[in-house]
Image (cartoon, helix red, strand yellow):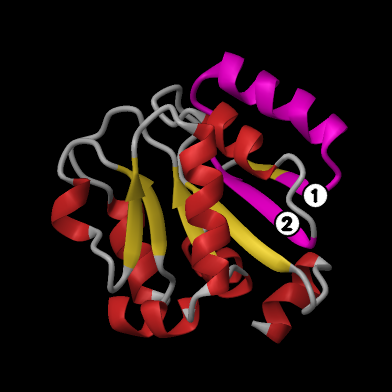
Amino acid sequence: KKETREILNIPMTRRVILCFGVLRNYRVYEYLIEATREMAGTDILVVGREHDKEVYADLLNHQKQMPHLRLISGWIPDNEVQIYFNASDIVVLPYTEITTSGVTLLAYTFSRPVISTDVGGMKEVVNEKIGMLVPPRNGRALKEAIEKMFAMDYEAMGKNAH
């Protein structure tokens, strides 16, 4: 974690939320933005290849207003994926629709707990021992889940996930 945070220039004193994957409109980033807008001591990394231009433009605008939001767009080479997961504390995936999520399983391989929305098959891969589910399109519930997870032993949850 220390090494990857140095690469990303993120102090060890900060909490880091990762939202990883292709930038698509079924990931409703506006709820992640709403949930974390005034979250002190927390950096948000949104990392992935641009797919929907409107989503990308919206994230760029939010990044200008929120210094703790960092958008890293483009194809992430396999050997660099570990940088973002290892630098993070938790992974947040605010889907509005999805069948299943490869990012969730990837997060577990890096011992990171996941907060996601209760859509599709997410309840099959996220439970209270390794993460949390929240209703979709609910920034308040997402914020409460993030704050609750950071108050818990999220590192133990990550180890359970692994």
Query: Does any portion of residue 162 appear in the rendered image?
Result: no
Frontmost residue, 53 versus 140: 140
Q: Give the range drawn in magenta.
A: 41-70
Q: Is residue 53 magenta?
A: yes
In the rendered image, the vertical position of residue 64 relative to residue 112, given as above or below: above
Frontmost residue, 68 versus 35: 35
Dot 1 or dot 2, earlier in sequence: 2
* Residue bearing mark 2: 43
Query: Percent position (x, y) of residue 7?
Result: 77, 72
Per the rendering, the mark at residue 92 is: none
The image quarter in which residue 10 lies: bottom right
Give the number of callouts: 2
* Residue bearing mark 1: 68
Q: Residue at x 46, y 38 (%)?
A: 22
Q: Which amino acid does label 1 sit on?
A: His
Q: Label 1 to label 2, Cα distance in Å?
A: 5 Å
Query: Does any portion of residue 130 appear in the rendered image?
Result: yes
Query: Percent position (x, y) of residue 82?
Result: 52, 71
Query: Percent position (x, y) of residue 114?
Result: 39, 60
